[in-house]
Image (cartoon, grey):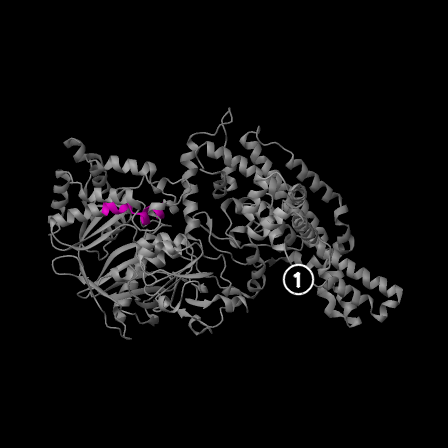
């Protein structure tokens, strides 16, 4: 590199010279700190060694070639997206990664670059500094990168500062950082790193401040975790910190004393030292300090436009801000539900067990299922809320489910007349003979028979619109026939009441013959056929559903089962696996292992079940009054009419799902073309786009999509995918808002250990106590990780663990932050998890209540 090129490469800059728009130069942490300085926040003075310095170091040394070779075969390039065997358990990135990092540390820095760093250090006045990594993908919305790169505290002397900078650069290539980037979909070839150097703050107290409650999502609350000494003890999870919940003004709503297991402070001559703290019930922060923290937090949140995760330190009566980043995995503000919402909420929460994709919401839901609900509500003069009100979004992704409150209008007063007219005209028993039903089936068959391959883009989109339009047939039928359901049911119940047999009503209605009951019997027949096939019968007992599917695909035998299974899929394969509202979820035909799992569940010895519907009908027929034939006919006719109404409700749902396979076929075809255009990596990524965005696309005369499409849509796909990952583990609607939460977690009977609720949700699994990194390989997928503490090297284990239980640590520790992003429950600061829980013990971890319970007692209750 010649002098002119060197001068064009910016290598150091004062913090105040950079701001939020300079992430590419300063990394996420550095850009945020520069912005804070510009806005007058109390930030320790410092400078940034830019990404340009890192890139110059690579270009002028042999490290660049070593890094290129590492990336060509390294863990970030593994075809399955996982870490290599070498780096799966040691926290270092394997032998190649360790060698690469050693090369960073041992390679002499170019003289001109070294001088610029030393000059900037001298300009700061020398002395003790903190040297902190700041990657370009760090501290951005959706990915905190908490602790994934290294920090060096109380670094003294120019040579040590230069070495710490090289070590920070090397930490970009640890396995924890690479695994985290893989999960966030960040291209390893595009990431770079800056370094922040700041005057060391000799903190008396330090910790983290969340400007919203990270567990509940409550925006009117702030949360502070604190400990004496440097904040490293808090963010690394080495201590159970003092825990404050504040209101918006900084007033303490609740306080939990900390463990003060260790105090980290600056050591004489450089580095840090540890000592044992003195535990006490008295808060370490005064009311005035908490109020000042709250004021800084609110100001930072206003400036950055979203809730912040702030690292702070108190020294000499002054509060310093050491970092401010967007809070990740923050639940939405909990809604306040009225009586109507609590009543209808369970119905909607059942439909929305999974978070809808943008294409779900803008396509099948808005133009199919919800259009049907709007049509049904409109037929009685009721306005159903919009999809935006039902499923509010942030950054294009659904964040919450708000149970609807249908709004009556003046037309509602005339609804009883309309409903009575329809109930008399349209009898549920006759609905499949309605010409509109035949038209719907004809439309579906026509759509299923259409070849999409030769069609232009606009024609495939129009095909999807035809699928939505076909649903209008089911909507019209439901509008006509649903009003006829309540009258026969009420009539039957009234007759049963007079006969003294009202208790039979639920069983009689359950006896309705439906397509679902027919499917269940077909599954039982499949299980019976498999039972007569020795090889398949053995596989059902010994193998999981995917292995059985592989067996059927590889072996040529099992003819009887193959034919029956194929016939079943033709008849019932359009059924949804997750929810009728989600076209993104596979159908039974798309996921045959789901059906095989059902067959497996029905195989082997099954307890005999009483025919409740048949027994109820037999008991009714034995009633003495039904010896009078005219009365008998009227009562049994009422039962049949009530059953027909229930069957219509179930079967119209069954037929509505017939529109899903052709819709999914259209999406797969469009997704395939977007992969060819470089917009998507996999066809299924199309679900991150909205239907209107698909409608806006036009292909060229030769059918190819324009090259500019990638630049326009690829960033949207990546951003929405990142937002979805951020929301993993956060329910669309907290069931406690509907059903109540019961007793506080720590007072629950049977609690094994309790601590800070750090990442919400529940998970059940066997305990695996891991005390040191040497034991990492003992953890198996689905186990509950129980450990004394964590640091960033432990976070790859979170991809395997069902939940995390930690003796120490609080809301702001690395473990808590990463657990929330990975969407797994976490309980921090238990104090005794590793001594109370034992390997193999099955437990239920409730990260919302902060408790660990014996799973056996819950499963048996």
Query: Residue 850's spot in the image, x, y percent?
Result: 41, 66
Q: Nearer the viewer, residue 748 or 439?
A: 748
Q: How many marks?
A: 1
Can the viewer see residue 742 in this picture? Answer: yes
Quadrant placement of the C terminus: bottom right
Q: Main secondary structure of the magenta part?
A: helix
Residue 381: name its quadrant: bottom right
Please give the range of residues in magenta: 168-181
Taking the magenta stretch, the answer to whether it contains residue 110 is no
Residue 153, position as x, y percentages in the image: 19, 56
Say which residue appears at 38% left-offset and 68% top-offset.
Answer: 755
- SS type, badge 1: loop
Q: Is residue 296 left or right of residue 108?
A: right
Q: Counting other residues with Cα less than 10 Å from the Cα at mark 1, is it few (<14), some (14-19), or many (20 or more)?
A: few
In this view, the residue in front, 275 or 502, is 275
Q: As drawn, which residue projects farthest toward the front?
A: 534
Using residue 622 as the reference point, say whether residue 234 is left or right of it. left
In percent of the image, x 42 and y 42: which residue is there? Answer: 80
61 vs 768, nearest the viewer: 768
Q: If the image is split into quadrants, where does the N terminus sit?
A: top left
> Is residue 172 within the magenta segment?
yes
Q: What residue is disc 1 on?
A: 607
Q: Is residue 700 above or below residue 760?
A: above
Q: Is residue 308 visible?
A: no
Where residue 603 sits in the image (x, y, percent)?
63, 54
């Amino acid at each position: 590199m010649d002098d002119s090129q060197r001068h064009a490469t910016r290598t150091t800059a004062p913090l105040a010279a950079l701001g939020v728009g300079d992430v590419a130069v300063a990394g996420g942490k550095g850009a945020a700190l520069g912005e804070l300085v510009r806005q007058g926040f109390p930030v320790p003075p410092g400078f940034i060694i830019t990404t340009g310095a890192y890139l110059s170091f690579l270009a002028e040394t042999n490290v660049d070639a070593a890094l290129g070779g590492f990336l060509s075969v390294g863990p970030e390039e593994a075809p399955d997206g996982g870490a290599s065997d070498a780096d799966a358990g040691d926290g270092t990135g394997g032998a190649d990664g360790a060698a690469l990092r050693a090369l960073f540390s041992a390679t002499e820095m170019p003289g001109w670059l070294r001088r610029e760093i030393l000059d900037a250090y001298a300009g700061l006045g020398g002395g003790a500094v903190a040297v902190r990594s700041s990657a370009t993908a760090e501290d951005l919305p959706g990915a905190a990168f908490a602790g994934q790169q290294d920090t060096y505290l109380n670094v003294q002397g120019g040579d040590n500062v230069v070495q710490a900078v090289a070590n920070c650069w090397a930490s970009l290539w640890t396995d924890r950082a690479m695994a985290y980037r893989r999960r966030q979909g960040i291209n390893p070839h595009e990431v770079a790193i800056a370094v922040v150097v700041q005057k060391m703050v000799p903190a008396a107290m330090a910790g983290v401040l969340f400007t919203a409650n990270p567990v509940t999502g409550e925006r009117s609350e702030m949360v502070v975790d604190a400990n004496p000494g440097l904040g490293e003890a808090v963010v690394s999870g080495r201590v159970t910190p003092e825990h404050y919940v504040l209101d918006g003004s900084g007033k303490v709503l609740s306080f939990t004393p900390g463990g003060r297991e260790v105090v980290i402070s600056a050591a004489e001559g450089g580095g840090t030292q540890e000592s044992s703290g003195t535990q006490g019930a008295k808060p370490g922060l005064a009311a005035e300090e908490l109020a000042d923290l709250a004021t800084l937090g609110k100001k930072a949140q206003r400036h950055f436009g979203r809730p912040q995760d702030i690292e702070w330190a108190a020294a000499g009566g002054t509060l310093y801000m050491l970092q401010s980043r967007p809070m990740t995995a923050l639940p939405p503000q909990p809604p306040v539900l009225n009586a109507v919402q609590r009543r209808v909420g369970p119905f909607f929460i059942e439909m929305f067990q999974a978070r809808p994709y943008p294409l779900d919401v803008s396509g099948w839901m808005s133009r199919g299922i919800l259009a049907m609900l709007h049509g049904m509500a409109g037929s009685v003069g009721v306005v159903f809320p919009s999809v935006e009100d039902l499923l509010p979004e942030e950054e294009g992704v659904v964040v919450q489910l708000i149970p609807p409150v249908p709004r009556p209008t003046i037309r509602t007063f005339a609804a009883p007349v309309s409903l009575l007219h329809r109930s008399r005209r349209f009898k549920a028993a006759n609905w499949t003979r309605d010409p509109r039903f035949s038209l719907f089936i004809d439309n579906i068959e026509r759509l299923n028979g259409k070849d999409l391959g030769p069609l232009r883009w606009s024609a495939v989109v129009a095909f999807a619109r035809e699928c939505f339009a076909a649903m209008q047939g089911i909507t019209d039928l439901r509008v006509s026939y649903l009003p006829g359901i309540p009258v026969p049911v009420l009539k039957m119940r009234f007759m049963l009441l007079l006969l003294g047999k009202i208790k039979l009503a639920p069983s009689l209605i359950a006896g309705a013959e439906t397509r679902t009951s027919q499917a269940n019997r077909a599954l039982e027949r499949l299980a019976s056929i498999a039972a007569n096939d020795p090889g398949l019968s053995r596989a059902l007992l010994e193998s999981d559903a995917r292995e059985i599917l592989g067996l059927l695909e590889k072996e040529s035998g099992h003819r009887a089962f193959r034919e029956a299974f194929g016939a079943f899929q033709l008849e019932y394969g359009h059924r949804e696996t997750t929810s009728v509202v989600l076209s993104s979820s596979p159908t039974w035909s798309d996921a045959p292992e789901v059906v095989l799992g059902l067959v497996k569940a029905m195989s082997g010895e099954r307890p005999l079940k009483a025919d409740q519907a048949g027994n109820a009908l037999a008991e009714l027929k034995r009633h003495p009054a039904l010896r009078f034939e005219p009365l008998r006919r009227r009562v049994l006719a009422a039962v049949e009419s009530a059953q027909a109404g229930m069957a219509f409700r179930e079967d119209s749902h069954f037929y509505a799902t017939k529109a899903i396979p052709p819709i999914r076929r259209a999406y797969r075809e469009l997704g395939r073309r977007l992969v060819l255009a470089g917009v998507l990596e996999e066809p299924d990524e199309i679900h991150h786009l909205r239907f209107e965005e698909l409608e806006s696309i036009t292909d060229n005369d030769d059918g190819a999509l324009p090259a500019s499409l990638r630049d326009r849509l690829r960033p949207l796909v990546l951003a929405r995918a990142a937002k979805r990952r951020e929301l993993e583990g956060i329910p669309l609607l907290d069931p406690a808002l509907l059903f109540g939460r019961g007793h506080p977690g720590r007072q629950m009977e049977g609690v094994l250990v309790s601590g800070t609720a750090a990442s919400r949700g529940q998970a059940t699994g066997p305990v695996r106590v891991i005390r040191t990194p040497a034991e990492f390989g003992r953890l198996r997928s689905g186990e509950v990780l129980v450990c004394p503490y964590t640091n960033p090297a432990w976070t790859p284990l979170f991809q395997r663990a069902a939940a995390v239980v930690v003796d120490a640590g609080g809301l702001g520790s690395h473990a808590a932050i990463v657990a929330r992003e990975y969407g797994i429950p976490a309980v921090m600061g238990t104090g005794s998890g590793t001594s109370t829980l034992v390997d193999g013990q099955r437990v239920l971890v409730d990260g919302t209540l902060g408790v660990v319970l014996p799973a056996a007692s819950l499963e048996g209750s």
